[in-house]
Amino acid sequence: MNCANDSALVISQAIQHGLLECLLRTGSSRAERVDNTKRFEDDHDIQLLKELPRFFVFSKVLRVLQPALQRLDGLGLEERASQDPVLWELWQAVDSAARTFTNFHELPEGAPFYRYQCCSPKCSLNFSEDDVTAYRCSGCMLTRYCSKYCQKEAWESGHRVHCRMLRSALGNQDVREIRKSLPVIAMIESWICEERVNEIRALDKDVVKTSENDRSIVEVDLTVYPIELNMYSLRDYFLVSGSHTFEREVAESITTSEDSPYDLVAVKVRLGREYYSLFSPATALGVAFGWTSGIQGGRYIHEHPRTPDP
C-alpha cells in the first residue's frame, strides 16, 4: 500500500472487501499466544492495523469506512479479539479514530463544497462535482467557477490574495485526493489543536527562535497514529519539511492573536511513498471562504444531528 500510485484507493477497496473483519479474526487464543512485544513488531497483520488510521483522513477511505464499521457491529467479532491483548488494545485505538473521523466526514463542514458550487462570491450556481464544463483555477487548483465571468469576478473580489494560500493548503501539489479531502483534514486539524492545546503550549516554550521576527509553527502529523505534534521555528521547519510543502511567504503573511498558543499550523499527510506538508487547511479555507470547523473546546458545537466525540 505504500508503493501504490493511489494507496487511498487500495485501502478503500480492501475495507470494502472485508479487511477489518479479517484483521479482527487474526486474534490469537491464550494457547496460541507468542511473545507480545515481538509480535507487535513482527506480525504483518498487526503492522497493517497500525498503518490504517493514517488513511482515515482521506474522503475516499472514509466513504467506505462507515458501512464497514456498521458491518463489524453486527458480526460480534469483539469477543474473540478482546482475548488477544495486543490486538485488542490496538483495535480500540483504530476504532476510536475511525468513528471520530467518519463523523467529521459526514458533517456539512466536511464536504468539499468548492467542488460543486461556483466560488464567485456573487454567484450561487451549483453544478455536478464531475462537471467538466466548470472552470478550475489553475493557480490554487481548488476553486471552480460556472463561467469565465465569475472567475474574473472572484479574482477581483479577493481570490488574487487567497489563491496562493489555498495552493499552499494543498502542499503546492495538485493531488486529487488531498483536494477532495481538504475540509475533513481541516476539521481534524481544528480538533487536534483544540483537544491538545496544553501540549502545544508546552512545546512552544521549548522552541528556539533565531531572530525576533522568527515564528513558531506546530506540525500536526497525520502520517502516524496516535497523531503526533511537533513544534519548530518557522526557519527550521522549512529545513526539515521536504520538497512537497507550502510557500514561506504565505506563512509569513498570516497574523495571529497574542493569546494564541501557536503562531502557525502545518499538517503532514502521506499518500503512497510521498509526504506532503500542507499550510493550515483550516486557516486557508477560513480566510478564503469563511469556512469554520464548528469545533470548540475539542467538541463539535454546530446545530447538526451528529456530534463527534473525541
Image: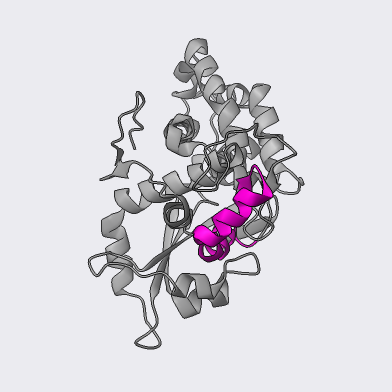
Quadrant (top left, top right, bottom left, bottom right) of the N terminus: top right
Name the residue at the front extreme.
149
Q: Does the magenta stretch include residue 147?
A: yes
Identify the residue shown where x is 28% and y is 44%: 296
Residue 152 in the image: above or below residue 294: below
Residue 186 image point, x, y percent: 46, 48
Q: Does the magenta stretch include residue 170?
A: yes
Q: Give the range drawn in magenta.
A: 144-172
Identify the residue shown where x is 50% and y is 58%: 157
Name the residue at the left extreme.
259
Residue 214 in the image: above or below residue 27: below
Identify the residue shown where x is 55% and y is 35%: 34
Residue 266 image point, x, y percent: 48, 62
- Frontmost residue, 229 versus 157: 157
Residue 156 image point, x, y percent: 54, 61
Identify the residue shown where x is 70% and y is 48%: 2
Residue 217 seen in this snapshot: yes
Count of residue discs: 0
Main secondary structure type of the part rendered in magenta: helix
Residue 97 seen in this snapshot: no
Instruction: Tell me if 298 is positioned left or right of 111 in this view.
Output: left
Residue 11 image point, x, y percent: 66, 35
- Frontmost residue, 188 versus 127: 127
Quadrant (top left, top right, bottom left, bottom right) of the C terminus: top left
Name the residue at the bottom extreme.
211
Instruction: Tell me if 120 is positioned left or right of 83 in this view.
Output: right
- Frontmost residue, 303 versus 134: 134
Which colour style is shown?
one colour
